[in-house]
Image (cartoon, rainbow, N blue to C red):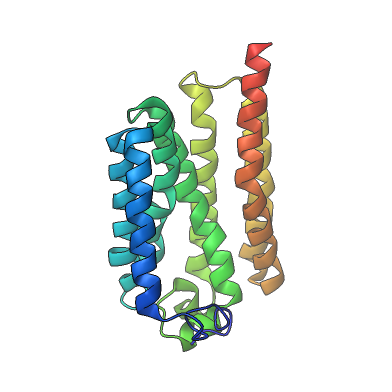
């Protein structure tokens, strides 16, 4: 068992796994029952697909392949695409761009966490790349690569005409801000720099959303 999660309700034995499963399925049914009539069926289908991928694809893969992290970014990013369909009723270029940002963002975010707890993951038989990547070469390379992909996706709203230079300035600044600790981690492979990546990634998404809001306000002036 992982020390990091040992005190959560199910591992600690405060809630039985079967009870949690049926409670979760009940919440899913209730959520779909609200989403479909209040938004549209497409959003409900995407929500169901997100849960199915997370529970029956990503979660079992944690003990079978290090590819689980990349696969897990799909259900992790689908909610933002669902938000787009809820607002617009269709899958649009803006929604796919946000999906791409969130998908790429998850890789440095999670790999930094997995590097910090790589021994814990290894002892729990979870096949996370940082646990088997002793020198951290592949981990650091993927963190840099996906951070760059994240930055590219983050500037696409300007390219397709959805945002202005105000958003562009914010998106580029935030991307470089996250890239800096990622590059430091490349050189040091230290837990301290992995934690710096994690902290920067946690702040990145709400700050990027703030840049979107500021941009919309600027356009309306």
Q: In which quarter of the image is residue 68?
A: bottom left
Residue at (64% x, 64% y) in the render: 185
Q: Is residue 118 above or below residue 81?
A: below
Residue at (65% x, 32% y) in the render: 211
Q: Quadrant of residue 20?
A: bottom left
Q: Is residue 120 above or below residue 185?
A: below
Q: Is residue 157 above or below residue 75?
A: above
Horizontal and vertical percent position of residue 74: 37, 52
Horizontal and vertical percent position of residue 38: 38, 34
**Front-most of residues 204 and 192:** 204
- Judged left or right of residue 43, residue 149 is right
- Judged left or right of residue 87, residue 63 is left
**Front-most of residues 56 and 30:** 30
Residue at (54% x, 83% y) in the render: 120
| Quadrant of the snapshot with the C terminus | top right
Whether residue 34 appears in this view of the structure is: yes
Whether residue 149 appears in this view of the structure is: no
Q: Is residue 83 above or below residue 148?
A: above
**Front-most of residues 137 and 158:** 158
Residue at (69% x, 46% y) in the render: 177
- Judged left or right of residue 192, residue 118 is left
Horizontal and vertical percent position of residue 176: 66, 43
- Judged left or right of residue 3, residue 19 is left
State the residue lying farthest toward the top.
221
């Amino acid at each position: 068992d992982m020390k990091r999660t040992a005190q959560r309700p199910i591992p600690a034995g405060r809630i039985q796994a079967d009870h949690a499963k049926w409670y979760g399925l009940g919440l899913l049914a209730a959520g779909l029952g609200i989403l479909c009539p209040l938004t549209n069926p497409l959003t409900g289908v995407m929500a169901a697909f997100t849960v199915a991928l997370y529970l029956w694809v990503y979660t079992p893969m944690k003990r079978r392949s290090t590819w689980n992290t990349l696969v897990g970014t799909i259900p992790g990013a689908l909610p933002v695409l669902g938000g787009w369909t809820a607002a617009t009723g269709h899958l649009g270029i803006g929604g796919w761009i946000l999906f791409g940002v969130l998908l790429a963002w998850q890789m440095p975010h999670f790999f930094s966490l997995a590097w910090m707890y790589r021994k814990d993951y290894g002892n729990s038989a979870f096949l996370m790349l940082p646990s088997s990547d002793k020198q951290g070469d592949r981990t650091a390379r993927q963190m840099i690569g996906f951070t760059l992909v994240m930055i590219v996706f983050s500037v696409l709203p300007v390219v397709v005409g959805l945002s202005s230079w105000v958003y562009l300035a914010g998106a580029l600044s935030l991307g470089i801000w996250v890239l800096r600790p990622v590059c430091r981690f490349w050189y040091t492979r230290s837990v301290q720099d992995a934690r710096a990546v994690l902290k920067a990634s946690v702040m990145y998404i709400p700050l990027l959303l703030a840049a979107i809001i500021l941009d919309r306000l600027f356009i309306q002036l």
